[in-house]
């Protein structure tokens, strides 16, 4: 399959390598060309423009936020004009519910197929082809995407035909992740103040009440105070919790926990932690408890 891939960050790097290894032809575009060129040795075709990447049967965008998508889809990039008649555009990033609706409407107006398919997983999961993909779109469009999804992820969850549904599921999941990280940070801060070893507490809790990977993985990072290199930066955590509050506001859904977590992200950024992993909420909690 001929695939265009727009936006080459840490997640996309592993995703593209897996597509290439599976025999797909992948044209890559990134505003910072060097990031795209890093994949040339693996067989990727580095193209000079968004329109060049869009001229494929499947086009995947993995961009950081709404503003980045705005510059690709709604600026003078020629994206929709270059997208072939029977092609599908798949947005795999975490974006707002409002941007999801804009993308759906823009593709419908241009008579082009659009699928929303954000992912759960960190860069190591992307490299291993073990992402969980949350997809929504028409059955025909999803069918065209399936060979690529099978290479990039271990399972695809189809949540409906309206693409925005996948955006809301992703926002919901990231809210729950951020809330879990905050509770881990608070719990370890409390235990440490009483002289309890963080590693021993982690072993006890994850062997009994909290055995899910999110507790084991983020719990280990907080217990070891290991926040670099970041798999997902703290400033992106602020973006995602803000998306949850924005979506909640649109539907008059109170989310008091999300508001607390947002303030913790803001505190972390004010202390200069924005480029640390978002597990550094644990450092914010430790700071507030007077711990080092």
Image (tube, rainbow, N blue to C red):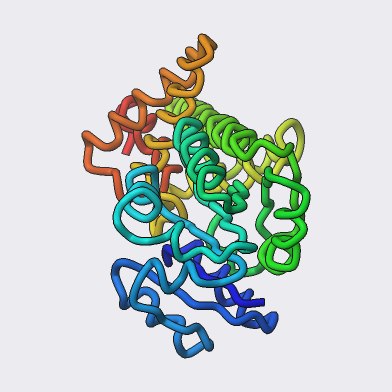
Please count the marks in the image.
Answer: 0
Residue 200 location in percent, x, y?
Answer: 61, 42
Q: Is residue 154 above or below residue 13?
A: above
Q: Quadrant of the C terminus?
A: top left
Task: Locate residue 76 relative to residue 93 in the image: left or right.
Answer: left
Foreground pick, 14 / 118: 118
Seen from the viewer's position, the closer of residues 176 and 110 is: 110
Which part of the image, by quadrant, shows the N terminus?
bottom right
Q: In the picture provided, is 166 more to the left or to the right than 63?
A: right
- Residue 8 seen in the current view: yes
In this rendering, position of residue 22 left or right of residue 102:
right
Q: Quadrant of residue 269?
A: top left
The answer to whether 19 is drawn above or below residue 74 in the figure is below
Towards the viewer: 58 or 260 = 58
Q: Quadrant of residue 155?
A: bottom right
Residue 135 percent location from the top left of the image: 68, 46
Q: Is residue 249 above or below residue 241?
A: above
Q: Residue at x 47, y 90 (%)?
A: 41
The location of residue 284, given as percent across then percent down, is: 35, 33
Whether residue 196 is visible, yes or no, is: no
Rendered location of residue 141, percent (x, y): 70, 54
Residue name at image x 52 percent, y 38 percent? 105
State the residue at coordinates (58%, 48%).
118
Residue at 70% in and 61% down = 145
């Amino acid at each position: 399959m001929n695939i265009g891939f727009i936006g080459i960050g840490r997640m996309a790097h592993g995703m593209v390598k897996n597509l290439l290894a599976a025999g797909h032809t992948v044209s890559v575009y990134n505003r910072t060309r060097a990031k795209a060129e890093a994949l040339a040795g693996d067989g990727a075709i580095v193209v000079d423009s968004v329109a060049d990447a869009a001229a494929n049967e499947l086009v995947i965008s993995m961009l950081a936020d709404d503003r980045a998508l705005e510059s690709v889809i709604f600026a003078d990039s020629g994206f929709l004009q270059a997208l072939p008649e029977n092609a599908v555009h798949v947005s795999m990033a975490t974006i707002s519910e409002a941007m999801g609706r804009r993308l759906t409407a823009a593709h419908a107006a241009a008579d082009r197929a659009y699928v929303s398919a954000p992912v759960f997983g960190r860069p190591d999961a992307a490299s291993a082809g073990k992402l969980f993909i949350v997809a929504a779109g028409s059955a025909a469009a999803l069918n065209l995407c399936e060979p690529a999804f099978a290479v990039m992820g271990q399972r695809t969850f189809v949540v409906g035909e309206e693409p925005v549904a996948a955006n809301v599921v992703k926002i919901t999941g990231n809210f729950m992740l951020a809330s879990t990280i905050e509770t881990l940070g608070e719990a370890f801060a409390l235990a440490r103040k009483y002289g309890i070893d963080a590693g021993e507490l982690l072993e006890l809790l994850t062997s009994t009440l909290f055995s899910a990977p999110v507790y084991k993985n983020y719990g280990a990072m907080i217990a070891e105070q290991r926040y670099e290199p970041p798999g997902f930066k703290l400033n992106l955590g602020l973006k995602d919790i803000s998306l949850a509050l924005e979506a909640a506001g649109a539907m008059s859904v109170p989310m008091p926990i999300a508001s607390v977590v947002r303030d913790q992200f803001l505190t972390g950024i004010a202390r200069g932690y924005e480029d640390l992993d978002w597990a550094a909420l644990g450092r914010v909690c430790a700071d507030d408890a007077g711990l080092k």
